[in-house]
Image (tube, grey):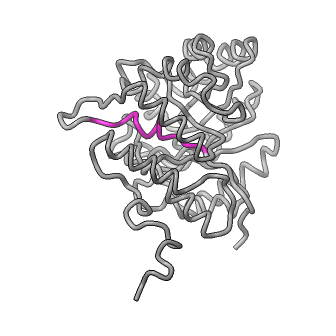
Amino acid sequence: MNLPDSVRICEVGLRDGLQNEKDKDGNALVLKTEDKVEILKSLADAGYKVIEAGSFMHPKRVPQMADTDEVMKQIAGKIPDDVELRVLIPNLKGVQRALDCGAKKVKLNVSASRMHNLKNLNRTPEESVAGFEDCVKFANEHKIEISGSISMPFASPWEGRTPVEDVDAIIEAYLKLGINEISLSDASGMAVPNQVFDLCEHVRAKYPQATWWLHFHNTRGVAMANILAAMQAGMTQFDSSFGGLGGCPFVPGAAGNISSEDVIHMLDECGIRTGIDVVKVMAISRKIKDLVGHNLESYVLRAGRSKDLIGTQG
């Protein structure tokens, strides 16, 4: 199997992991700002070099993210300078909020599914792309890094399999604006390994100037297989969420992301370097479990690391 020697993992639990959390009464579960700051510090201590710290979506639509500005202000100076914090934004106002709270990197998003884009951003994909130019101009003027993501590049619960040409059109719109870092986000959890391999090979060959992130939800239990398929196609950057938390609030039946500790454990066992301490990530997930008040979708958290079993059986 042709796999890389090392990969980068971005922890998205503080954004994608928490944005869909509800309390026992079905209301938005909003963690305290100070808890989020402590989690950020713990993630940096565990070895993460890229963390998605929150989003600037409208607080009425995603109340779990309403304090992202304050989180960014409070974390300033408390983690190493080489840790990249990124924030998801929907529009120009999001970049302006990033500037105000000291965020150094923002991520735009558009869905390859027209219906999903309307539900998520209240715009058609074309309207989203048209609005990116002002975002990029403002970010460049204020030395804020900017990346882009594409939701539903594999399939959508509304339209089914996503045509490759629809994905290419969004990639080319990003590249035209000077955005060369692009995430392919399987928010619906409908991707399968052969499709992932084919699309990853396609975009790497057609757009060599771009760098790529892959973001897999484990809705149907194939996210780990999709990561392996993406690595075989040459991809080396992946998102994951502590404890497998997550799920887009605008996707029917959405489940969480692939669990960070499960991914890191698999990579450790494969001899693939991440620079992240899986034991520390497991401790973070246990704390998250207490904060959200329910079990998490993490195999390693339940069963422990494989190496911890060696020599313990009679």
Name the residue rendered at 59%, 37% in the picture: 51
Q: Position of residue 233 (x, y in %)?
A: 70, 60
Toward the viewer: 289 or 235? 289
Name the residue rendered at 67%, 33% in the picture: 80
Name the residue rendered at 52%, 57% in the picture: 279
View extreme (left): residue: 25
Is residue 12 inside the magenta stretch?
A: yes
Q: Is residue 69 left or right of residue 138?
A: left
Is residue 170 inside the magenta stretch?
A: no
What's the magenta region?
A: 10-22
Figure quadrant of residue 43: top right
Name the residue rendered at 68%, 41% in the picture: 168
Toward the viewer: 7 or 247? 7
Q: In the rendered image of this protein, does residue 94 appear above or below residue 110?
A: above
Toward the viewer: 145 or 49? 49
Q: How many marks?
A: 0
Q: Is residue 177 left or right of residue 183?
A: right
Q: Position of residue 229 (x, y in %)?
A: 62, 63
View extreme (bottom): residue: 314
Q: Position of residue 28 (x, y in %)?
A: 29, 29
Q: Is residue 45 left or right of residue 217?
A: right
Q: Locate the N terminus by quadrant.
A: bottom right
Q: Is residue 107 left or right of residue 61?
A: right
